Image (spheres, rainbow, N blue to C red):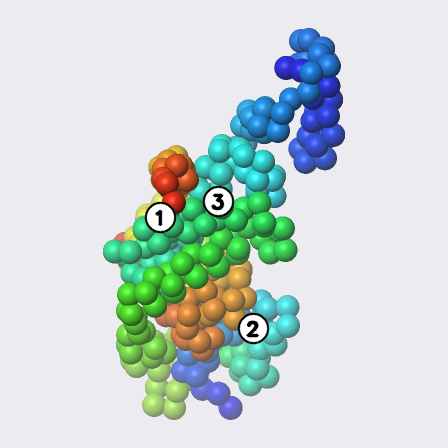
Amino acid sequence: MLYYAITDLNGALQQHWGWAITARDTPARSAVTLDKKERLRLLSAINTATINPSTPDEQLVTAAQQGSEAALVELINRYQTLLLAVARALVGHAHAEDTVQEAWISIHRSLTTFEGRSSFKTWAARIVSNEAKTRLRRESRLVALDDSELERPTLDDNCFKANGHWASKPSRWHSETPDSLLEEQQLKRCIDKTLTLLPDRQKAAFLLRDLEQRPLDEIADLLAISNANVRVLLHRARLTLLQVVDHYQETGQC
Amino acid sequence: MLSCRDVAKRASDYLDERDSPKGQPSLQIRLHLMLCSNCRRFVRHMHSARQLAALVQRGRERSEQGDEVLSHIKRQDAAPPPP
């Protein structure tokens, strides 16, 4: 390693990562400066050591912008599931993987222009959504919402009297807090299975809203549906999940 | 006055409106919930179920496709531009 180049790099490292290379890491001094390519290679190698699943997105994006492949791989591992869910909601299972792969190429190419005005995952989800919409237009493929998905479902009519009041009270749960429910391994498996089986649009709406806390208007835009339809999809997904927990509380089974 | 069936139909919207910084659940629903313990329980259960599902999903959120996708990106970058 070359002393002056590392001294130069330390400013950037301290700014972005909160640490810098110490004298112990610099075996020899030299007045020769590193060219840009070598600086990036060095920075990339340094960054690799600090990247792990808890590294904040901002640091990963900065490292990826500077050429760190490890940072890019971590971003992909972190957001591939979400991006696939968005793509499936728009183009279906058969084309989702290709759509997301193409989107990652676009993300990689435009990464240097990403300025962090929105979060990385919002930006990436928008690129996937645009890629999917372009594909639909190119293939003249309209994927209309199934009418049955647009109806707002309610509980079984037997739950209510003719005047609309509860015929039988909602059942009492043994425990109600999410953390205590999570301790029940069988219930966890039931929910896991239900999430796998949720229709694509319901799944995407659920992930974007209840996991990522995105606003309804943004979800509507990403999934190319109306705000009212997003609310119906959310209602359906949540009602399904509630009924799974309800059934488990009554029977101890999925 | 809304019926319990109406409130059950709007429970999901109520949760979004309640959670939104700008949103305000409708007065009709809030009034109904003040008076009806069954609907309060239903809404509470829906809230717990979605939070539980979010926790379960978070545990399985991580993909391991990073290296595969990176190889694809590199292949594309190395490919000659179309004529």
Three-letter code, disc 1 = Pro
> In the rendered structure, the residue with mark 3 lies on which chain?
A
Q: Which residue is mark 1?
A: B82
Determine which of the numbered discs, if any, sits on residue A108 in the image: 3
Residue flagged by tag 3: what amino acid is it? His
Q: Are marks 1 and 3 in contact (CB under 8 Å)?
A: no
Q: Nearer the viewer, mark 2 or mark 1?
A: 1
The location of residue B27, given as percent across then percent down, is 59, 84
| Left or right: residue A132 compared with residue A73 | left
Give residue A194's position: percent from left, percent from top: 31, 57
Residue in the image at 46% along x and 70% along y: A220
Which type of secondary structure does the marked residue at label 2 adopt?
helix
Mark 2 lies on residue? B17
Q: Chain of mark 1?
A: B
Residue A180: x and y in percent read 47, 50
Compared to residue B66, the image places residue B1 above or below, namely below
